[in-house]
Image: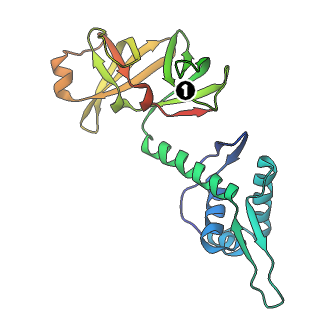
Amino acid sequence: MTDSVESPEYKLEIGNKSILLDYKRFMLLKGIKEHGSITKASKEIGIPYRTALKYIEIIEDELEATVVATKRGGKGGGGSSQLTSMGKMVIKEYAKLNSILKKHSDVNEVEGRVSEIDKHSRVTKVALNSKTVILPLIEDLKMGDNVLLLISPDNIFVMLEPQESSVRNMFKGEIIEMGFKNEMVRLKVALDKDINIFVDITEYSSEKLNLNLGKIIYIGFKAASVPVIKI
């Protein structure tokens, strides 16, 4: 049995379909890919064979496609199971999303709604109350979709005045908390009602900018540095 901690379900967009996949089902498919056997894969993660078949059935029903192709053996055995191209895509998409979330485990999670899709300028705009975040065009999002933006504290820069730059996302805010985390100064900046952003800067930068509680600052981040999850 795997001793890994189970993760919550992730919503994956596969083609024009979406599925919910948790860590156990991911490991089942990964085990089938590695061992060529549903039996071996189910034993490895500690679930009954019939449960494994049910997991596969649910995934295939949601995708309306085959993810595991089984070849029956003769009287002497020899059967095998292999992931189809769709099955391989499922584990690839889960692994990609899981990698992003692990890398950005300490992030600002900001919920918003897609308010504009400009295919000519190739940008997607996400409304956060009265603020708007501009992102690169995301093909699988549509108007009105609810999304979660993952903004890493160390990808945000601080200024005392707004400056001309190529950075599209720049917001005015007030420092409402200051402290230390991982040898960095961590600021809590209020941008809008119910929208607070954590920012990490060096102690040298904090002193140079003369930052203190209540100070009005400007924060910015690059559009391409923000992973987006449809929720």
Residue 73 x, y percent position in the rendering: 80, 82
Q: Nearer the viewer, residue 222 or 52?
A: 222
Specify few, some or many for label 1: CA neighbours under 10 Å numbering under 14, 14-19, or 20 or more.
some
Residue 210 x, y percent position in the rendering: 19, 15
Name the residue carrying label 1: 137
- In the rendered image, the vertical position of residue 226 relative to residue 216, given as above or below: below
Residue 226 x, y percent position in the rendering: 46, 30
- In the rendered image, the vertical position of residue 211 relative to residue 46, given as above or below: above
* Residue found at the very far front of the displayed protein: 120
Amino acid bearing label 1: Leu
Q: Nearer the viewer, residue 168 or 188?
A: 168
Q: Quadrant of the C terminus?
A: top right
70 left or right, relative to 143: right
* Residue found at the very far right of the displayed protein: 75
Q: Nearer the viewer, residue 108 or 26?
A: 26
Q: Residue at x 33, y 13 (%)?
A: 218
Residue 60 x, y percent position in the rendering: 78, 54
- Count the labels in the image: 1
21 left or right, relative to 188: right
Q: Residue at x 56, y 18 (%)?
A: 120
